[in-house]
Amino acid sequence: MDWQPVKRFERIDGVKTLRYMVADGANSESCVSCHNAYEQRKDIIDRRVGAGVEPGKQWQQYQLMGALEIQVSVDKIEALASSQSKLTLLLVLIASAGGVLLVGLIIWRDLQKEKETSAFFEQEASFDPLTRLLNRSGMERSAEAALQKSQAMGAGLSVLFIDLDGFKPVNDTYGHDVGDELLIIIATRLKAIVRESDIVARMGGDEFLILMEESPESERCHEVARQLISLLSQPILIRQHPVTVSASIGISRSPENGLELSELIRKADQAMYEAKSKGRANYVCYTEAV
């Protein structure tokens, strides 16, 4: 006979349970002996009598057909499946989030590199590559901010326009390499004299500019100009070559000589040419007569 498995769901003791039954031939000798022993029990004999069946039957091998039943708590299976599904979903989410995080990290890294690169080039665009002082464009941005600050605080600014006397003969005599080293030394000396808050820039060639904040009554710009003339006139030894230059300086001041940066630089430049005309190694403050 072809006995098919039987299964059904029941609630046993309040627990959803799967009952699974399958036919079992029970053909081993131990199974037969066990069943024959059951037939000798009083409760089995009483059951047989009550059913109108002659008691005490002794079974022979291959005469028995039994059934195996398996009960499985479905609640446990559903809970396990749910936890597995949640775990799978969690792993998928983690993997997805990890992928998103990785992509985000790559984008953030690229943006940081782009930002750093942009900042690097922006800084490079503001500085003179030889002396590492501010160049003209970098000076203008810094000076405009300083000028606005001084005007808001009711303070003043002094602009010192510096031109080296005798620089061209150095280039012509010793070459541009010596001239470049001279400009680097001059830049170092300029920064050594001024305050950290002052602005020092190379305007181009052998021209430099210093912008310093000071009150209208201050005479510091005169003091700095004298120090610069003295320091820059000292001989410099470059590659065994004694080099001597001097400086002509023009000074303009805000607010008396103007409020715009371009106007202050123009007037300081005019005053510098006046200083050159008076014998060089000199400084002149701008006046209407200049």
Image (cartoon, rainbow, N blue to C red):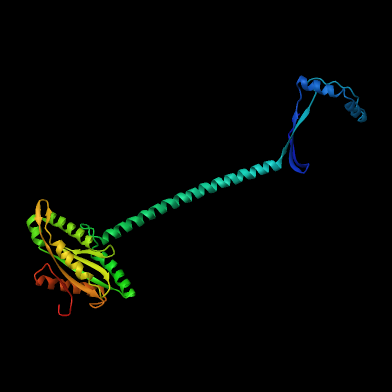
Viewer-closest of 11 and 118: 118
Q: Looking at the picture, how far across and down is residue 63, in whole percent?
A: 80, 23
Q: Could you tell me which quadrant the N terminus lies in?
A: top right
> Which image quadrant for residue 279?
bottom left
Image side of residue 262 versus residue 84, left or right? left
In the rendered image, the vertical position of residue 76 relative to residue 267, given as above or below: above
Q: Looking at the picture, how far across and down is residue 170, in whole percent?
A: 9, 58
What is the total number of numbered labels drawn onto the structure image? Answer: 0
Q: Could you tell me which quadrant the C terminus lies in?
A: bottom left
In the rendered image, the vertical position of residue 113 relative to residue 75, given as above or below: below
Image side of residue 139 versus residue 25, left or right? left
Residue occupying image coordinates x 32% and y 71%: 149
View extreme (left): residue:
173
> Which image quadrant for residue 199?
bottom left
Image side of residue 54 versus residue 224, left or right? right
Residue occupying image coordinates x 41% and y 54%: 108
Image side of residue 107 versus residue 132, left or right? right
Viewer-closest of 61 and 189: 189
Q: Looking at the picture, how far across and down is residue 88, in whole percent?
A: 58, 44
Residue occupying image coordinates x 31% and y 69%: 145
Q: Looking at the picture, how far across and down is residue 75, in whole percent?
A: 70, 43
